[in-house]
Image: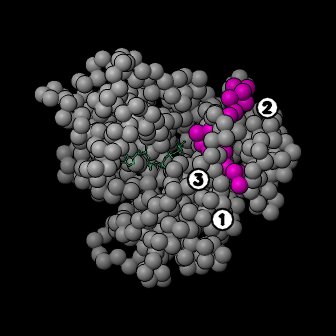
Amino acid sequence: MFGGEQEPDNYYVGIDVGTGSVRAAVVDQRGVLVAYSEQPIKKWEPQFNHHEQSSEDIWAACCVVTKKVVQGMDLSRIRGLGFDATCSLVVLDKQFRPLPVNHEGDSRRNVIMWLDHRAVSQVHRINETKHSVLQYVGGVMSVEMQAPKLLWLKENLKETCWDKARHFFDLPDFLSWKATGVIARSLCSLVCKWTYSAEKGWDDSFWKLIGLEDFVADNYSKIGNQVLPPGASLGSGLTPEAAKDLGLPTGIAVAASLIDAHAGGLGVIGADVRGNGLICEGQPVTSRLAIICGTSSCHMGISKDPIFVPGIWGPYFSAMVPGFWLNEGGQSVTGKLIDHMVQGHAAFPELQAKATARCQSVYAYLNSHLDLIKKAQPVGFLTVDLHVWPDFHGNRSPLADLTLKGMVTGLKLSQDLDDLAILYLATVQAIAFGTRFIIEAMEAAGHSISTLFLCGGLSKNPLFVQMHADITGMPVVLSKEVESVLVGAAILGACASGDFPSVQALISLKVNTRF
Ligand SMILES: Nc1ncnc2c1ncn2[C@@H]1O[C@H](COP(=O)(O)OP(=O)(O)O)[C@@H](O)[C@H]1O
Ligand SMILES: O=C(CO)[C@H](O)[C@H](O)COP(=O)(O)O
């Protein structure tokens, strides 16, 4: 972004709602992050594969972090606000009150999270229809998308939720509604998770065929019949009530939102790489793959013309970079898998104690422990006898098979810290091989990728980044600004403010690291 080296006059606020926490940042007109705050959010897992959150808890966390980042600032310099969030499903009634998405009737828990796999039977039936909209999600709809979840609600919670529901929002759209009172949806969420077409709109025949004809009957008013491009300015901007909640001025511009992975993609894909000797310098932006690695990893590749890749979501038109088609590969659990493997190991308490004693994160400790035990050989060779298959939560791409499970081969009876470190390494390598598998599928279908641009929590782990470079054989670029997802959200706010002509004009960022 945003260009220019002059002293900043204008600032933009980005709010990023991830799976585990909400982050806010103030970003100046040069694209520099000047304040940052983070707050955890609640998650419930009332039964296996059911994952729920609370939209009120999420909004409250947005308010806490935003108030913190603008503390002491001249608020009149804040020109715009942008949101991104996970693609979770929020359910509200006629008065915009939360409705329960669970058998317990707990209306606090009104969000079915993106990683929730309750709607297995529903997605199976949807895929059996072989409807033409499925071509635009890689040929197979994921259980993580919204149509199967909506059908599950209709079939399982008819009285307590479905019949009372008036608004079904993707979480990024819920946030922009909460800030502005405008119920218009972002093209990003509707195209990527709800089968909406940027060119043709909703397909009545799909909703009728899968048993959700209710939406057609009321002209899609419950799921969105006003659609805006990400970055478009919403209504009259921030309402007085939301302004009070967030500690921001009433009326500042608020943008139509993005899904979190797409905000990260926007934050990194246009990076200015000049002078780094990278292969992608001078190549079109379509040679870049943005990988947003947090709880999950999302692999975002763009093209001028639509490319149909079996098992990879899309092609989606204008869902991330306006005017480009997007393909989105993904691994449903990556950060969550690494945490699961490390925290579940018998040597974890010892690891935690040793890391704490050195004032290090467990991952920094494990990385230095691997360096110690590798001796003269390259670290990657420590796993010649131990292998992980990482699909503990199914395979999102390119196999698109939610029934797949994880595997570890080569286990021994010992369970000491060395074993834990090597299991951690094998898990990171397995995830990197998953990325290679996705890239191979994208290239076989017509993409031509030369360089990876990583962001998200896992990109702060040097071992994770190095393994991606080694295993894919591609250079990995990290942004100068570590919190690229928040920069993507702030780009939306900057675009909505009218200070910049378009999202495209805003996506050139500086980089400083390569692996
Ligand atoms: N400094 C770090 N070193 C290693 N791993 C990290 C670091 N920071 C975050 N992570 C990992 O990144 C993942 C969370 O990434 P994040 O982008 O915060 O997720 P989300 O957006 O899904 O909430 C976790 O698995 C966490 O362990
Ligand atoms: O489906 C997705 C994007 O299309 C993401 O996996 C989902 O939004 C969760 O993101 P994160 O792992 O960053 O919390």
* Residue, disc 1: 178
Residue 51, horizontal then vertical, whole percent: 63, 42
Q: CA distance from mark 2 to mark 3?
A: 36 Å
Work out whether 47 lies above or below 164.
Answer: above
- Which part of the image, by quadrant, shows the C terminus? top left
Dot 1 crowding, Cα within 10 Å, few <14, some 14–19, many 20+? some
CB contact under 8 Å: marks 1 and 2: no
Residue 197, horizontal then vertical, whole percent: 64, 43
* Residue, disc 3: 42
Q: CA distance from mark 1 to mark 2?
A: 32 Å
The amino acid sitting under disc 3 is Lys
Is residue 75 visible from the viewing direction of this image? yes
Magenta span of residues: 108-125
Is residue 284 visible from the viewing direction of this image? no
CB of mark 1 near ligand 2 (< 8 Å): no
Q: Which of the two residues, 237 or 513, is positioned nearer the viewer here? A: 513
